[in-house]
Each structure stands twice: as C-alpha cells, then as structure tokens.
Amino acid sequence: MLFCVLLTSCTSVYKGLQRTEGKVDCIQQFSPAFDATLYSTQVNILKHHLSGLLFFKQMPDSSLRVVFANEMGFKFFDFEFDKQGNFTKHYLLPKMDKKAVVTTLRQDFELVLLRPDLRQAHVATDGRYRYTVVPTAKGNNYYITDTACTQLVRIEKSSERKPVVKVWMEHYTQGTPDTVRIEHQNFRFNISLQKTHR
C-alpha cells in the first residue's frame, strides 16, 4: 500500500460515480452500422507509423471484415468479427504479428464496434455525464454519454483505477461516425480514422 502511495494515488478516477436508474441498452444506438465504409487511416504503434485506407465490410453471413491496406493495396491486417462476437485473424503484417498486438487491435476494434455484453451492466453518473458501466476481466468499459443518452461523448476501457484506452466516435452520418480516434494511455498506440466520402 505504501508503495502505491509513494508512486501514484491508489484512488480510482471513477470513485465519484453514483449508481443510478436507467436503461443500459440506450448505448446500442451508437453502434456503427458499417456496410461498406472506407476510412483514411493513420496508425502509430510504438516506433512504427502506418497510413492507408481501412475498410469495414459487412459480409453476406453477417460477419464484419476489417481490412487495413496502404494506397497501393499492400495489406497491413485483415480481421473478421462474426455476429456472435468471435474474432478471426486472417492476416497481420509479419513484423507486427505478436500476440500482444493482435489482442490490442482486437480489443480496440471491439470498442469501436460497440457490441458490449450488457447482462452485467449498470448505469452511473458523475452529475455531468451518464456512464453505462460494463464489467470486464480487468476493470470496466465505460460508455459515456450526455445525461439523456442522445450523444456519445467517448468510450473508456479501464483498469480498476484509471482509463487505459479512450475512444472517440464523432459526427455520425448514415449510422456511421465520420471520425474515430483510439488512444492508449500507457504507451504509444494510436489509431485515427477519417471517413472518405466517395
């Protein structure tokens, strides 16, 4: 405990949240309706910088493919999420193909797809925002909206005490956000998406 006090505060940044009444499923309205959606994309992973196009493609079997390639068509990764939430890695650039990278990318895109298991979820508030709190193995995912749940402010994946990943999805048009930003708080791993209007 002393070690914790010397290095950092042990208090959770979420300690002020008060549990409140509310429907947890209101956040499902913010789940992007990806059909065939293309984003201009920048990815910074530690010392690596990648840029290109990220394509979300709804497949006939209701699975969703997420493919990231450069402008010349050279593929960086190709992932699949089926409607049951299962994940398949079809391809990942060999120098990035490490278990930690795959797990991180999978969890990041699961936050963006916004398909949480709400069976254990509850609603809380800090007086300014509404938090839909979804327990995870190592903390919680917080889906933060205005108090009326009409606008998504951000998503936070947290440890027990603080956010480790923050996601912003803004300016929805035709059911999908124009911009998506994913920022890891403990190391340099950021993804920025800007919808291309063809």
Image: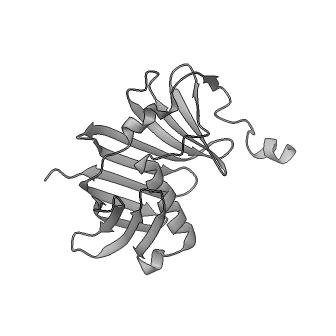
- Classify 117 as above or below 88: above
Residue at coordinates 40% horizontally, 56% vertically from top-left?
Answer: 191
Quadrant containing the N terminus in the rendered view: top right
Q: Is residue 162 left or right of residue 71?
A: right
Please state the horizontal and vertical placement of residue 64, each as a whole percent of the image: 35, 60
- Classify 96 as above or below 135: below
- Quadrant of residue 19 in the image? top right
Residue at coordinates 26% horizontally, 53% vertically from top-left?
Answer: 35
Residue at coordinates 41% horizontally, 50% vertically from top-left?
Answer: 113
Q: Quick one: 59 or 143, which is closer to the camera?
A: 59
Please state the horizontal and vertical placement of residue 195, each as a whole percent of the image: 24, 50
Q: Is residue 95 left or right of residue 3?
A: left
- Classify 91 as above or below 147: below
Q: Quick one: 89 or 95, which is closer to the camera?
A: 89
Taking the view exactly as shown, the residue that stands out farthest to the left is 198
Taking the view exactly as shown, the residue that stands out farthest to the right is 2
Q: Is residue 123 left or right of residue 175?
A: right
Please state the horizontal and vertical placement of residue 138, each as a whole percent of the image: 67, 51
- Classify 191 as above or below 125: below
Residue at coordinates 16% horizontally, 50% vertically from top-left?
Answer: 197
Taking the view exactly as shown, the residue that stands out farthest to the top is 127
Please state the horizontal and vertical placement of residue 172, each as a whole percent of the image: 28, 38
Q: How many marks?
A: 0
Taking the view exactly as shown, the residue that stands out farthest to the front is 61
**How are the residues colored?**
one colour
